[in-house]
Image: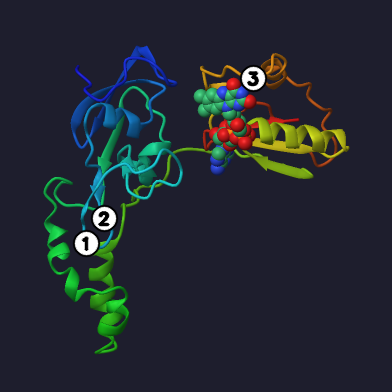
Amino acid sequence: MSQPFRLVSGGLIDRTQPLRFRFDGREYQGFAGDTLASALLANGARLIGRSFKYHRPRGVLTAGPEEPNAMVHLRTGARREPNTRATMVELYDGLEATSQHCWPSPRFDALAVNALLSPLFPAGFYSKTFMWPAGFWKRVYEPVIRRAAGLGAAATEPDPDRYEKMHVHVDVLVVGGGPAGIASAVYAGSEGMSALVLEDVAIGGQAGTSRSTCRWSAPARPVLQRPRPRPAPGPGSCCARNAPSSAGRCAASV
Ligand SMILES: Cc1cc2nc3c(=O)[nH]c(=O)nc-3n(C[C@H](O)[C@H](O)[C@H](O)COP(=O)(O)OP(=O)(O)OC[C@H]3O[C@@H](n4cnc5c(N)ncnc54)[C@H](O)[C@@H]3O)c2cc1C
């Protein structure tokens, strides 16, 4: 399958491991290491959804949790997960996603008519306009506005899954396991405090994931990559190293 927007090499993509997935019923191919967003972009799929109010065409804007546009329904049936950021979903074989907040499709969205009426809809107009008759807000205005402007739709069946959870009490919680995060946790440990590092992608941050680092001092990499001894669990402290949680993140104790 041709992927006109895929670089030939580089990044965290394993181009020897193709994965098949579907978006809005259409089959695509990505590779291990892709996110749903990167795989869609590689295939030239740039239109992912529509904007909240005026239903203007929207595509991927960022590369992480801050993504405001590329929100999709992930999976189907009881496991359907609405408002999932395509930039945060690691691609897997058989992944199924659909666009949300557009009907019948992102390409042709009937509610795009809102954009034509935008001069009549200034910010907050609904808070001032739909005030009477008083009983209409709850029964008519709000249900209609929510249907037109709401985002994804949650699954209606009970959730069949059970979730991993962990109760942790530490002195210092560090978010981000790059050099700065690891150093903070090491220094906290050297002061006798317990520390927990939460990492989204890979312990080591950019220093661990960039292949082209050239000026790292010789001892820097081995220090970052060396497995650290696990401290004896003390009362009220519980840590796991590189244990993926239900959110797909890593936690490392230092
Ligand atoms: C290609 C490249 C080459 C480089 N070469 C060198 C070099 O040769 N020598 C040198 O000294 N420097 C080099 N650098 C710079 C160096 O890698 C960075 O300065 C350093 O990694 C910054 O460390 P940091 O901990 O501040 O941030 P980062 O390394 O960016 O780490 C931040 C971490 O936080 C995680 N994170 C972010 N948000 C969340 C969240 N919400 N929850 C959980 N985790 C989260 C990220 O996944 C990341 O792992 C290079 C950088 C690049 C990109």
Residue that numbered label 1 is attached to = 54
Mark 3, mark 2: which one is toward the viewer?
A: 3
Q: Where is residue 12 in the image (x, y as percent from the top left)?
A: 44, 21
According to the image, label 3 marks what residue? 216
State the residue in front, 62 or 65.
62
Residue 53 to residue 132: above or below: above
Q: Position of residue 52 (x, y in %)?
A: 28, 59
Rendered residue at 70%/31% (across/down): 182
> In the image shown, does 50 or 180 lie closer to the viewer?
180
Q: Is label 3 within 8 A of ligand 1 (CB to nearest ligand atom)?
A: yes
Q: In this view, does 166 lie to the left or right of 145?
A: right
Mark 2: amino acid: Ser
Amino acid type assigned to the residue bearing label 1 in the image: Tyr
What whole-number distance in Å separates the C-alpha atoms at marks 3 and 1?
48 Å
What's the coloring here?
Answer: rainbow
| Quadrant of the rendered image containing residue 117 | bottom left
N-term mark: 3 or 1: 1
- As helix, strand or loop, the secondary structure at mark 3 comes to loop
Marks 3 and 2 sit apart, C-alpha to C-alpha, by 43 Å
Q: How far apart are marks 2 and 1 (CA)?
A: 6 Å
